[in-house]
Image: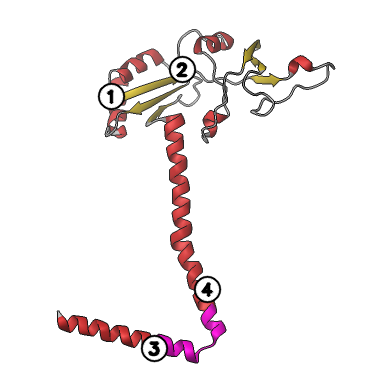
């Protein structure tokens, strides 16, 4: 043990001696450049990588918390809605590891703000945003050729674009506008209880759907 410690201290002294000798005899500009390049390399490998990983992890947590949950069920290719949605929801709700379920109807439409003040027939209404259409403002929404007027009750800022860029209304009102009466939804987000494996729940749902 003492021999190993002695060898380590000897190696440390030799290393320090050679480093000091190199600094004294070498060019200060060269030494400064080497230290600068090594510092940039360290920042690139450790600091910047850690920041990028943190940003990705934060975005993933926001997406899971506010939009997708632990499991997201979407439509099949070339389908506009999830077939047999009520049956799938029954299977999900019967799983012991499920904490909450969010079935969603999703449809495209047009929103208009400040349309009541338009005077010219060729004048275009303002695009709805949190600035010109604040809480308490009236907006006009057109979906599938049907137009309704609504009152803005709140504005969401979750940092999840899939949520912040959407308008949320009562599901029965949206079904009427879309002409959908079959209760087939477009998305189902599932939140699981802590410690439950999402892969295991996914396999159980696939087996139940078959």
Q: CA distance from mark 1 to mark 4?
A: 58 Å
**Mark closer to the observer (1, 3):** 3
**Mark closer to the observer (1, 2):** 2
Mark 1, residues whose alpha carbon is within 10 Å: few (<14), some, or many (≥20)? few
- Residue indicated by mark 3: 18
- Residue indicated by mark 1: 207
Q: CA distance from mark 2 to mark 4?
A: 57 Å
**Mark closer to the observer (1, 4):** 4
Residue at screen point 44% across, 49% down: 54
Q: CA distance from mark 1 to mark 3?
A: 68 Å
Q: Describe residue 153's horizontal placement relative to residue 118 as left or right.
A: left
> As drawn, which residue projects farthest toward the bottom?
25
- What x and y, as percent, mark residue 93? 32, 18
| Magenta segment boundaries in residue numbering | 18-32
User: Is the residue under label 3 in contact with that under label 4 (CB below 8 Å)?
Assistant: no
- Residue indicated by mark 2: 185
Q: Is residue 210 visible?
A: no
- Residue indicated by mark 4: 36
- What x and y, as percent, mark residue 87? 35, 14
Query: Closer to the N terminus: mark 1 or mark 4?
Result: 4
Q: Secondary structure at mark 4?
A: helix
User: Is the residue under label 4 in contact with that under label 1 (CB below 8 Å)?
Assistant: no
Q: Is residue 205 magenta?
A: no
Query: Closer to the N terminus: mark 1 or mark 3?
Result: 3
Q: Is residue 125 above or below residue 37?
A: above
Q: CA distance from mark 1 to mark 2?
A: 21 Å
User: Is the residue under label 2 in contact with that under label 3 (CB below 8 Å)?
Assistant: no
User: Is the residue under label 3 in contact with that under label 1 (CB below 8 Å)?
Assistant: no
Q: Secondary structure at mark 1?
A: helix
């Amino acid at each position: 043990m003492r021999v190993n410690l002695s060898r380590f201290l000897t190696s440390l002294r030799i290393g320090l001696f050679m480093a000091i000798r190199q600094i004294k005899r070498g060019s200060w500009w060269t030494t400064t450049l080497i230290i600068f390049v090594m510092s940039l390399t360290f920042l690139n490998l450790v600091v910047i990588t850690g920041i990028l990983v943190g940003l990705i992890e934060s975005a993933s947590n926001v997406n899971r918390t506010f939009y997708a949950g632990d499991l997201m069920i979407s439509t099949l290719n070339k389908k506009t809605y999830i077939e047999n949605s009520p049956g799938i929801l029954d299977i999900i709700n019967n799983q012991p590891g499920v904490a909450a379920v969010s079935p969603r109807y999703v449809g495209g439409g047009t929103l208009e703000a400040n349309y009541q003040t338009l005077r010219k027939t060729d004048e275009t209404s303002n695009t709805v945003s949190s600035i010109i259409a604040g809480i308490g403002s009236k907006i006009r929404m057109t979906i599938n050729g049907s137009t309704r007027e609504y009152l803005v009750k709140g504005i969401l800022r979750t940092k999840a674009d899939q949520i912040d860029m959407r308008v949320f209304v009562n599901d029965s009102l949206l079904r009427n506008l879309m002409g959908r009466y079959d209760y087939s939804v477009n998305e189902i987000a599932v939140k699981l209880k802590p410690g439950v494996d999402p892969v295991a729940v996914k396999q159980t749902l696939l087996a139940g759907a078959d």
